[in-house]
């Protein structure tokens, strides 16, 4: 069967001398990237990697990162991107869960987590990729020329795994979404055939590498012969993001609406310097209408696309290209219609007095294989119908308009999107409860202009202990999951069923 590696090999063959990756003023050709990735694939095969073995990557953006991703998949392994900025305890839990065949790290990770050096070295086989001569770790000898053919790579089936993406889990442990070769190839191939991509494009690599939208950046660029314009991790402020965008001459940007909103509201965008920008893809959360309207009027030559798709359905499922600036009072933008042969069903069994809305259930080739090492959660969210089609219950409440497509109205549970990340509020509550000295707690999202701006923790304990909670949370969960505001109560209010009255707490404390 065809895999994304076939698409990459074709791109490598056609565009050997083209610039594949650019980081500031340093560039690497497709030929160089091909050689580096083949070296890593051969290294893993010589180590004895088997089809389906997981390889964890804890690295900042670099040419070695992109070579590692491709090399892992070429070897038949499963690419597992992990957030190198996550607290050590959280990383340890994810590593224990996937039991990696190998771990690739870089000097940034080691300098950040010096205490993890020995932990990784003795528990897992580890290679230090951006300094091949580092004496403490295994060496990979990178060859510049010629490009040696890989031998011994296993043949892959449609149901074999390409990657595992971790997302928030309600029991305090992140869930690993298992993406198959079939789903991954399907969406990349569809994109190449239906989105105007060419070797003349410069595609932004702005998203964090552990975030599923970064996969779009990488493979849409490298499978089409385009240049991947990399925004290193230190580029976080609007002026720096825009400076690199102008410098690279970016033609296509993929980003979360919260970043887009930050750029627009900074007031620093110079439309005359964005004359190369042809397309902006916004996904991960609803786009801000005011900012969209403002920038679309200033950039009439740029197309804006609203895309939708949970990690469990491989990158994205729908695309809605905006033909005109939205009205500020429009409320919601449609996410459009399904692509690649996927189909949607609305289940309103659990919704009362909302007959035109229902939970969105997705059928089709992009549906993931489930959650790694978690059959219980897999069975609750995934299934197979009588025709043998796999489906996924998204938890998103949606409606359908025959002319405009699907609209997403929110969640049927306590999952939110914050700064582009999907967060189960129950995961934060579970972690707070596990501290041992907090009796009860509720995490409340604070909304402004239709999007979550901050998180507030309301808790009860024997005494006020907000600072202690904050100190311990920093060691367990990522910064984007840590509440900014803390409210101490001697006892949380209860409803008639003697459960925490979440509605009352939201009403009373759900404001800034």
Image (spheres, grey):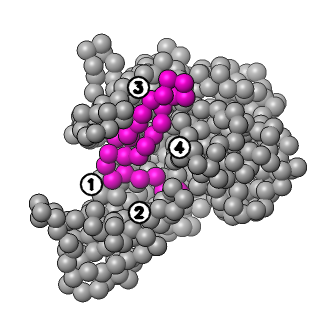
Please name the predominant secondary structure of the magenta segment in the image: strand
Farthest-out residue, bottom: 463
10 Å crowding of disc 1: few (<14), some (14-19), many (20+):
some
Q: Which residue is mark 3?
A: 344
Of the residues tagged 1 and 4, which is closer to the observer? 4
Which stretch appears magenta?
A: 394-419
Q: Secondary structure at mark 4?
A: loop
Q: Residue at x 45, y 29 (%)?
A: 400
Q: Position of residue 124 (x, y in %)?
A: 40, 51
Q: Is residue 399 magenta?
A: yes
Vertical order, 309 against 475 (above or below):
above
Q: Which residue is mark 4?
A: 332
Q: Which residue is mark 2?
A: 445
How far apart marks 1 and 4 lie (CA) works out to 31 Å
Q: Position of residue 204 (x, y in %)?
A: 70, 44
- Mark 3 vs 1, N-terminal side: 1
Q: Which mark is residue 171?
A: 1
Q: Which mark is residue 23?
A: none
How far apart marks 2 and 4 lie (CA) works out to 20 Å
Q: Position of residue 123 (x, y in %)?
A: 37, 54
Is residue 84 shown to the viewer in this render?
no
Of the residues tagged 3 and 1, which is closer to the observer? 3
10 Å crowding of disc 4: few (<14), some (14-19), many (20+):
some
Q: Are marks 1 and 2 in contact (CB under 8 Å)?
A: no
């Amino acid at each position: 069967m065809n895999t994304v590696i076939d698409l990459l090999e074709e791109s490598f063959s056609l565009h050997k001398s083209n610039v594949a990756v650019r980081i500031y003023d340093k560039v690497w050709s497709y030929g160089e990237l091909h050689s580096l990735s083949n070296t890593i694939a051969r290294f893993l095969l010589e180590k004895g990697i088997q089809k389906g073995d997981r390889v964890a990557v804890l690295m900042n953006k670099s040419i070695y990162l992109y070579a590692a991703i491709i090399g892992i998949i070429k070897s038949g392994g499963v690419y597992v991107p992990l957030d190198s900025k996550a607290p050590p305890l959280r990383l340890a839990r994810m590593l224990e869960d996937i039991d990696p065949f190998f771990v690739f790290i870089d000097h940034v990770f080691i300098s950040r987590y010096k205490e993890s050096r020995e932990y990784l070295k003795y528990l897992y086989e580890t290679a230090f990729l951006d300094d091949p001569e580092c004496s403490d770790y295994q060496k990979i000898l990178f060859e510049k020329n010629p490009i040696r053919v890989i031998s011994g790579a296993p043949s892959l089936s449609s149901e074999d795994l390409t990657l595992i993406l971790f997302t928030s889990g309600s029991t305090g442990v992140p869930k690993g979404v298992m993406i198959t070769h079939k789903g991954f190839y399907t969406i990349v191939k569809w994109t190449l055939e239906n989105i105007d991509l060419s070797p003349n494009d410069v595609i932004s690599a702005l998203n964090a590498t552990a975030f599923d939208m970064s996969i779009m950046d990488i493979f849409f660029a490298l499978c089409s012969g385009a240049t991947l314009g990399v925004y290193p991790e230190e580029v976080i402020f609007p002026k720096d993001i825009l400076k690199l965008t102008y410098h690279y001459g970016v033609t296509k940007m993929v980003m979360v609406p919260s970043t887009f909103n930050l750029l627009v509201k900074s007031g620093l965008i110079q439309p005359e310097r964005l004359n190369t920008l042809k397309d902006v893809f916004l996904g991960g959360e609803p786009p801000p209408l005011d900012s969209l309207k403002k920038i679309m009027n200033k950039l009439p030559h740029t197309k804006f696309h609203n895309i939708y798709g949970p990690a469990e359905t491989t990158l994205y499922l729908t695309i809605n290209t905006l033909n005109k600036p939205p009205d500020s009072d429009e409320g919601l933008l449609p996410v459009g219609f399904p692509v690649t042969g996927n189909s949607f069903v609305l289940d309103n069994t659990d919704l009362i007095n909302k007959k035109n809305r229902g939970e969105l259930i997705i059928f089709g080739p992009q549906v993931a294989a489930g959650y790694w090492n978690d059959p219980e959660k897999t069975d609750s969210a995934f299934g197979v119908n009588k025709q043998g089609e796999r489906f996924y219950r998204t938890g998103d409440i949606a409606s359908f308009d025959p002319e405009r497509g699907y609209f997403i109205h929110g969640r049927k549970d306590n999952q939110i999107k914050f700064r582009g990340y999907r967060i189960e509020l129950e995961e934060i509550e579970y972690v707070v409860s596990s501290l041992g000295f907090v009796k009860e707690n509720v995490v409340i999202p604070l909304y402004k202009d239709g999007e979550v701006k901050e998180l507030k923790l309301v808790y009860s304990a024997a005494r006020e202990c907000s600072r202690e909670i904050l100190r311990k949370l920093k060691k367990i969960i990522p910064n984007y999951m840590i509440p900014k505001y803390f409210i101490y109560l001697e006892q949380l209010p209860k409803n008639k069923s003697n459960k925490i009255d979440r509605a009352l707490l939201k009403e009373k404390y759900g404001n800034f």
